[in-house]
Amino acid sequence: MNINDMLSSDAMLINFDGTSKKQVLDELSKLAEKKLEINPRTLLESLIKREKLGSTAVGNGIAIPHANVSKIEKPYVFVSTLINGLDFNSTDDQPVDIVFLLIAPDNNGSENLQALALISRLLRNNELTTKLRGCKNTESALAVISQSIREEAA
């Protein structure tokens, strides 16, 4: 399993001027609708429900919201970098400015956990997150992520 298999340039909102956690999740849900032909409202409701269980902010300005949906075959990742950090109720009280949304198949628990662990491991790379925060467009963000994955594999 590789992030590059789950991510594409049409699954990114770079330098997004979001004003709330709900707005960011809503915009990412709309991207998922276009790419995966899923109901964005249902996805947003699932994401909000998951956030109520506990924040998906993992610290250092990063959040990894996630939801399981039916009718998809494999996990997908949608990425947003935010112009201004937002309150995600993070345990370290840092505003979130990098969001990696994981949408995974309903029926594949172990693969979904592997995908979540992979994203989490990738985002522990401070060099990656620093470079990602400096990206102004989708192409540069995708290149930064791909380069980090190549370096990690080497």
Image (tube, helix red, strand yellow):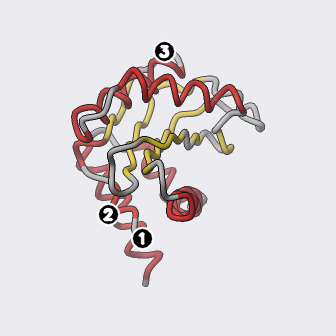
Total label count? 3
Q: Which residue is mark 3?
A: 19
Q: CA distance from mark 2 to mark 3?
A: 30 Å
Residue type, numbered disc 3: Thr
Is 138 on the left or on the right of 24, as rendered?
Answer: left
Amino acid under disc 1: Met
Q: Is residue 98 above or below residue 21?
A: below
* Disc 1 from disc 2: Cα separation: 7 Å
Residue projecting furthest to the bottom: 154
Foreground residue, 19 or 114?
114
> N-terminal of the two: label 1 or label 3?
1
Q: Where in the figure is residue 43, as x and y percent of width and height?
A: 43, 29
Quarter-wise, where is residue 54 in the image?
top right
Question: Residue at point 23% right, 40% down?
Answer: 35
Q: What residue do we see at 38% from left, 59% from top?
A: 145
Q: Nearer the viewer, mark 2 or mark 3?
A: 2
Mark 1 = which residue? 1
Disc 3 is placed on an element classified as: loop
Instruction: Measuring from the top left, give residue 112's x and y in whole percent.
Output: 52, 57
Residue 64: percent from left, percent from top: 55, 43
- Residue 67 position, x and y percent, is 51, 40
User: How far apart, in angstroms, are the residues tagged by discs 1 and 3?
Assistant: 33 Å
Residue in view at x 22 percent, y 42 percent: 10
**Would you say the residues marked 1 and 2 are in contact, meaning their CB atoms lie under 8 Å apart?**
yes
Q: Is residue 121 left or right of residue 44?
A: right
User: For the residue marked with disc 2, what is the amino acid?
Assistant: Asp
Residue at image mark 2: 5
CB under 8 Å between discs 1 and 3: no
Going from the N terminus, do you reach mark 2 or mark 3 first?
A: 2
Q: Secondary structure at mark 2?
A: helix
The secondary element bearing badge 1 is classed as: loop
